[in-house]
Image: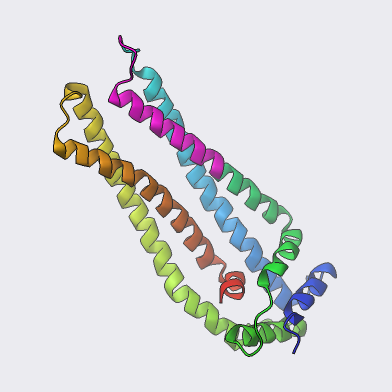
Amino acid sequence: MNNDNLQNTLYHLAQSGSFSNPAYHTLLHDYTAYHAVLFIEGSIFTLILMALSVYFWQQFRRIQKPTIHSWTFEKKAWFSFGLVSTVVTLFMLLIVAANLSNILNPQEGFIQSIPDLGTPQEGTQKAVLYQAVDIWARSGSVQLPPILQNEVDKRLSWQRPKAIICSILLVLVAIFATNIWRKLIKVSRTSEALWSLKNKALITIGVLAVPATLLLMLMALANTQASFAPIMLTLLFS
């Protein structure tokens, strides 16, 4: 068996514009949905980050210039938040723009993704899966082959709960981090030179909470995206 059959079949269907083939249409729709979900959800996060960036820089500029050549804890905090949120916003804008191009021209993006399927080793479960999908794609059947449907169902059985859990944790950690930094800034306004051991521990926790929030944001994005478009991911990572 030629283990590149699936790639060859998909190349042929894509280049011939076989939009009337239900199997190919299913794969192309799944690929398009994969990028559409990330574009929509990524845009929402980007707008939130943009609003936060504006707020952080406003707070930074609001603080009066100190009489000595140093910044207060509060000014340093707002500057750090503004810088991080601006960098992450630019990163998210890049991701959103890249996914928009795949939505506007899914055919070209799909063709470019075909080599990512790779060539499975003969006799493996992935080789059997690819052979079944190859037969399905050439047949033009509407119904997914049982082996692919089974793999998709197994992926969704853990991908959807993970998307929900990551989204909930994102909200909880974001609220937790916000409360910590509000308390620290409030303390710094009254007794910045007298940091207790407890407040120093809170600073450490607050600093760690920032990358944790960003990581959960990316995990929520990725798992939500995969939950709405599982077919291509199943083929790529089964």
How many discs appear? Answer: 0
Left or right of 211 on screen, residue 87 = right
In the current view of this chain or complex, which residue is farthest to the right? 16
Name the dominant secondary structure of the magenta segment. Answer: helix
In this view, 41 is above or below 65: below
Specify start and end residues of the magenta stretch as a single range: 67-91
In this view, 80 is above or below 66: below
Q: Quadrant of the N terminus?
A: bottom right
In this view, 72 is above or below 103: above
Left or right of 120 on screen, residue 238 = left
Residue at image position (32%, 41%) is 207
Q: Position of residue 52 (x, y in %)?
A: 42, 35
Figure coloring: rainbow
Q: Can residue 22 be seen in this view?
A: no
Residue at image position (69%, 77%) is 119
Q: In which quarter of the image is the C terminus?
A: bottom right
Left or right of 191 on screen, residue 170 = right
Q: Does the magenta portion include 36? A: no
Q: Can residue 134 be seen in this view?
A: yes
Q: Does the magenta portion include 75? A: yes
| Residue 175 figure quarter | top left
In the current view of this chain or complex, which residue is farthest to the top? 67
Q: Position of residue 65 (x, y in %)?
A: 35, 12
In this view, 123 is above or below 226: below
Q: Position of residue 199 (x, y in %)?
A: 18, 36
| Residue 33 figure quarter | bottom right
Q: Position of residue 133 (x, y in %)?
A: 68, 82
